[in-house]
Amino acid sequence: MTHSEDDEAMSLQSGIAAFEAKHFSRAMQLLMPLAEAGNAQAQYRVAIMHQIGLTGVPNPGAAVKWMRAAAEQGDPLAQHGLGFMFLEGECVEQDSAQAIHWMEQAANQGLAGSQTTLAMMYAQGNGVERDPAAARYWYSRAGFDADEMGLLDS
């Protein structure tokens, strides 16, 4: 690692620690330069702080910008977050196709929350054509036996 890579890793660790300790203004101060430099983990946390307004007033535009930047780099938590934004119409226009797209990206990386969300969307026909087979598949990927647990209406 070069000296600047060491510094970046330390800033990222410090920023994440500040975020987890709920010291959001400090977290933003540490993470924003890393987000601007393209670090997906920093972008994801900056997006969350903007989405919820943890450093002041919520900023939906910035939340979507940073969530999408991290999601497009393959960060599964950001992919789930962006999918959820589209599913709920939070910070963006509700868009089921985009919700499915981003949830599938995260689900295919093994994120159980995304797998379960997809399963429920297919089971309920929420934004997609009701598809019990797809629901069963995603429940199974998430570690649930849909039939045993009565998760699918017959």
Image: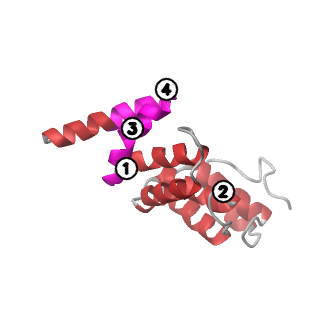
Q: Which of marks 1 and 3 is nearer the N terminus?
A: 3
Q: Are marks 1 and 2 in contact (CB under 8 Å)?
A: no
| Amino acid type of the residue that numbered disc 4 sits on in the rendered structure | Ala
Q: In which quarter of the image is residue 99?
A: bottom right
Q: What element carries label 3?
A: helix
Q: Height in image: 79 above or below 52?
A: below
Q: Mark 4 points at which residue?
A: 21
| Residue 139 in view | no
| Cα–Cα span, label 2 and label 3 | 25 Å
| Cα–Cα span, label 3 and label 4 | 14 Å
Label 2 crowd (10 A; few <14 / some 14-19 / many >=20)? some
Q: Nearer the viewer, residue 90 or 72?
A: 90
The reply, left or right, for residue 66 in relation to residue 153 is: left
| Residue 95 in view | yes
Q: Name the residue under label 3.
A: 29
User: Residue at position x 77%, y 69% from top?
Assistant: 130
Which quadrant is home to the N terminus? top left
Q: Is mark 2 on a helix, strand or loop?
A: loop
Query: What span is colored magenta in the figure?
Result: 12-38
Point out the frontmost of discs 1 and 3.
Answer: 3
Task: In the displayed orientation, state which residue is furthest to the left.
Answer: 2
Q: Mark 1 points at which residue?
A: 35
| Amino acid type of the residue that numbered disc 2 sits on in the rendered structure | Glu
Q: x%, y% of residue 86?
A: 63, 62
| Amino acid type of the residue that numbered disc 3 sits on in the rendered structure | Gln
Which quadrant is home to the C terminus? bottom right
Q: Are marks 3 and 4 in contact (CB under 8 Å)?
A: no
Q: Which of marks 4 and 1 is nearer the N terminus?
A: 4
